[in-house]
Image (cartoon, grey):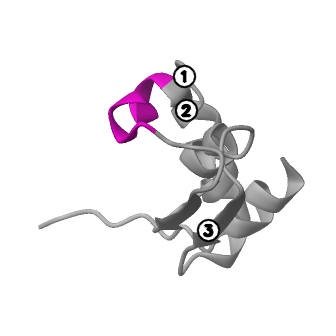
Amino acid sequence: MTAQMNFNDPEIAHEWSQFRDQGDPLQDLAALQLQPHDIFVDLGCGDGWHAIGAAPVVHEVIGIDCSAALLDIARAR
C-alpha cells in the first residue's frame, strides 16, 4: 500500500513547502545555463521553489501545478 499526500490540503502543502526549502535553487538550475531572454516553464512547480529561483535570471517564469494550495504558496513568495 502506498501512502499519498493530498497537496490540495493547505496544511499539508505548507508543511511540505517548509520541508522543501533547503539549499539554493539556482544551484539546482545551473546545468540549464539560463539566459536573460529565456522563458522558464516549470511544470509541476509545486510551491515555486525552482520558478522563484529562476525569476531573477530569466525574462519570464510560468509555473503550472495541479495543487491550488501549492500554487497559493508560490504566489505568496
| Residue nearest the observer in this picture, 14 or 51 | 51
Q: Position of residue 49 (x, y in %)?
A: 60, 44
Q: Amino acid at mark 1?
A: Gln
- In the picture, the quarter occupied by the N terminus is bottom left
- The residue that mark 1 highlights is 22
N-terminal label among 3 and 1: 1
Q: Position of residue 18 (x, y in %)?
A: 65, 35
Is 44 situated left or right of 39 in this image?
A: left
Report the Cα–Cα distance between label 3 and label 1.
19 Å
Q: Are marks 1 and 2 in contact (CB under 8 Å)?
A: yes
Q: Are marks 3 and 2 in contact (CB under 8 Å)?
A: no
- The residue that mark 3 highlights is 63
How would you rate the neighbour count of disc 2 (Cα within 10 Å): few for under 14, some for 14-19, many for 20 or more? few
Report the Cα–Cα distance between label 1 and label 2.
7 Å
Is 24 situated left or right of 28 in this image?
A: right
N-terminal label among 3 and 2: 2
Label 1 SS = loop
Q: Position of residue 41 (x, y in %)?
A: 52, 67
- The residue that mark 2 highlights is 19
**In the picture shown, does residue 2 fall above or below 22?**
below
**Which span is picked out in magenta?**
27-33
Magenta run includes residue 42: no
Q: Amino acid at mark 3?
A: Gly
Q: Residue at x 56, y 43 (%)?
A: 35
Label 3 SS = strand
Which residue in the rendered view is the most extreme toward the right?
Answer: 76
Is 43 situated left or right of 8 in this image?
A: left
Q: Amino acid at mark 2?
A: Phe
**In the picture shown, does residue 71 fall above or below 21?**
below
